[in-house]
Image: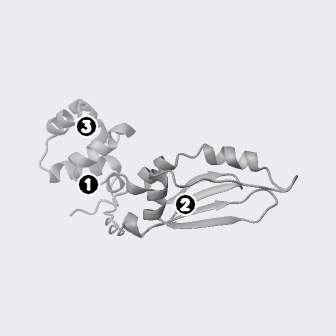
């Protein structure tokens, strides 16, 4: 592999094009531009449009990062994803001027409860201590079925954050 770090973007494109055995005409045709455009890129008279960089990188068999910086960057190893069945759904409810309530549910229990409408939230409070109605409205706006789908599709971290009163996240 050629050391690309010391080359300008244009020279980098030219070097990589030649390494792939492509002519300017062939690269231009694949990119949907004129051969003159490729020539201008290679002579540093103009630069490829930012939207075309991913396609150009694919044609040159490199990443956009390598195209722009000249550094061959190793891909980070994929982080193993914890199966949904091993996740914990955490729901934190903190009414104004009241103690925080945290629910920690294994995802399979959460999913079962949501899909069979087993959860209901009711609040009572002394007058002036907590706005139970506001909290109930916030909870009513949460689509718990959508949260189940997000988790099943790999979503992790904070999924709902409604100010100081309500947060739902997955770990």
**Secondary element at image label 1:** loop
The answer for how far apart the CA atoms under marks 2 and 3 are is 52 Å
Q: Is residue 68 left or right of residue 104?
A: left
The residue at which mark 2 appears reads as 169
The disc label shown at residue 62, or none:
1
Query: Do residues under tags 2 and 3 come within 8 Å of each other at their CB atoms?
Result: no
Q: Which of marks 2 and 1 is in front?
A: 2
Query: Which of pointers 3 and 1 lies earlier in the amino acid sequence?
Result: 3
The picture places residue 44, in percent across and down from the top left corner, at: 34, 42
First along the sequence among labels 2 and 1 = 1
User: Which residue is at a point 22% across and 49% down the rendered structure image?
Assistant: 60
Res 39 label: 3
Q: What element carries label 3?
A: helix
Q: Is residue 121 left or right of residue 127?
A: left
| Drawn side of residue 148 relative to residue 30, left or right | right
111 or 54: nearer the eye?
111
* 140 in relation to 69, above or below: above
Tell me which label, 2 or 3, sits earlier in the chain.
3
Label 3 vs label 1, nearer the camera: 1
Question: Label 2, label 1: how many angstroms apart (C-alpha)?
Answer: 36 Å
Percent coordinates x, y for residue 31 in the rendering: 23, 36
Identify the residue at image location x=50%, y=50%: 117
Q: Nearer the viewer, mark 2 or mark 3?
A: 2
Rendered residue at 21%/46% (across/down): 59
For label 2, the SS is strand
Quadrant housing the N terminus = bottom left
Residue 46 appears in the figure: no
Label placed on residue 6: none
* Residue 37 in the image: above or below residue 135: above
Q: How many labels does the image show?
A: 3
């Amino acid at each position: 592999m050629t050391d690309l770090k010391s080359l300008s973007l244009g020279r980098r494109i030219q070097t990589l094009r030649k390494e792939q055995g492509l002519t300017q005409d062939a690269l231009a045709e694949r990119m949907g531009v004129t051969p003159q455009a490729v020539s201008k890129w290679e002579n540093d008279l103009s630069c490829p449009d930012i939207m075309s960089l991913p396609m150009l990188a694919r044609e040159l068999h490199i990443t956009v990062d390598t195209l722009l910086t000249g550094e061959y960057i190793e891909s980070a190893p994929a982080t193993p994803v914890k199966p949904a069945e091993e996740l914990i759904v955490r729901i934190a409810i903190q009414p104004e001027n009241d103690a925080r309530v945290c629910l920690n549910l294994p995802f399979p229990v959460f999913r079962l409860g949501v899909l069979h409408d087993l959860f209901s939230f009711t609040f009572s409070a002394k007058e002036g201590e907590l706005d139970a109605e506001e909290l109930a409205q916030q909870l009513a706006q949460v689509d718990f079925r959508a949260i189940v789908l997000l988790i099943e599709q790999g979503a992790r971290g904070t999924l709902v954050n409604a100010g100081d009163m309500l947060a739902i996240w997955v770990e």
